[in-house]
Image (cartoon, rainbow, N blue to C red):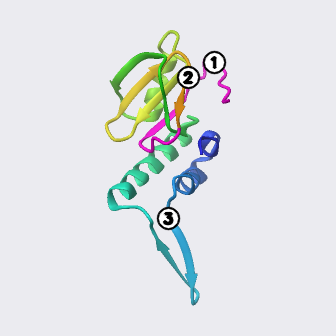
Amino acid sequence: MSMLLRRCAAVSCAVLLASAIGGNETTTSDSSETTTSSLEPDDQALQEKVQAEAAKASKDGTEVHQGVYLYGDLVIGETVDSATACKQACKNTADCAFWSFRITDNRCDLHKEDAGFDDTSQDWLSGTSGNTVHSET
């Protein structure tokens, strides 16, 4: 799933994210299109917020993927306005290589190393500072 968001364009990013986290299903019947959702209302609202933030970040030139970096912490719980602002905070922090932004409360965590990644955390977007090269295993 994280690979889907790595280099998505602003327009397609939300579509890729929706399919990656089990978003809306579309069915066609008698030349009319019906959209149904398999998500609970709270999950649907979160998905929409994540899609919007991912598209906004992509438009700003910030590469994102869904999930959260674990361990290697430099700064935990800084509050910022967006994923793009979290990336900028990482770029401006010595030894910061990776960042994670939680959509639900605008929490920004900065990390010095990739000591683990949880791609099942649906309310986080993450990326690199641009100061280092990130290679996934």
Q: CA distance from mark 3 to mark 1?
A: 35 Å
Nearer the N terminus, badge 3 or badge 1? 3
The residue that appears at 51% across and 33% down in the rendered structure is: 126
The residue that appears at 43% across and 53% down in the rendered structure is: 47
Q: Is residue 122 magenta?
A: yes
Q: Which residue is mark 3?
A: 24
Amino acid marked by disc 2: Ser
Q: Which residues are magenta?
A: 119-137
For disc 3, the neighbor class at 10 Å (few under 14, some 14 to 19, many from 20) is some
**What is the quadrant of the C terminus in the image?**
top right
For disc 1, the neighbor class at 10 Å (few under 14, some 14 to 19, many from 20) is few
Percent from the top left, x then y, of residue 94? 50, 9
Nearer the N terminus, badge 3 or badge 2? 3
Q: Is residue 121 above or below residue 111?
A: below
The local secondary structure at tag 1 comes to loop
Q: Is residue 111 above or below residue 40?
A: above
The local secondary structure at tag 3 comes to loop
Q: CA distance from mark 3 to mark 2?
A: 32 Å
The local secondary structure at tag 2 comes to loop
Label ID, residue 129 = 2
Chief secondary structure of the magenta span? loop
Q: Which residue is mark 1?
A: 132
Q: Nearer the viewer, mark 3 or mark 2?
A: 3
Amino acid marked by disc 3: Asn
The residue that appears at 54% across and 72% down in the rendered structure is: 26
Residue 48: image quadrant is: bottom left
Pointer 1 with pointer 2, Cβ within 8 A? yes
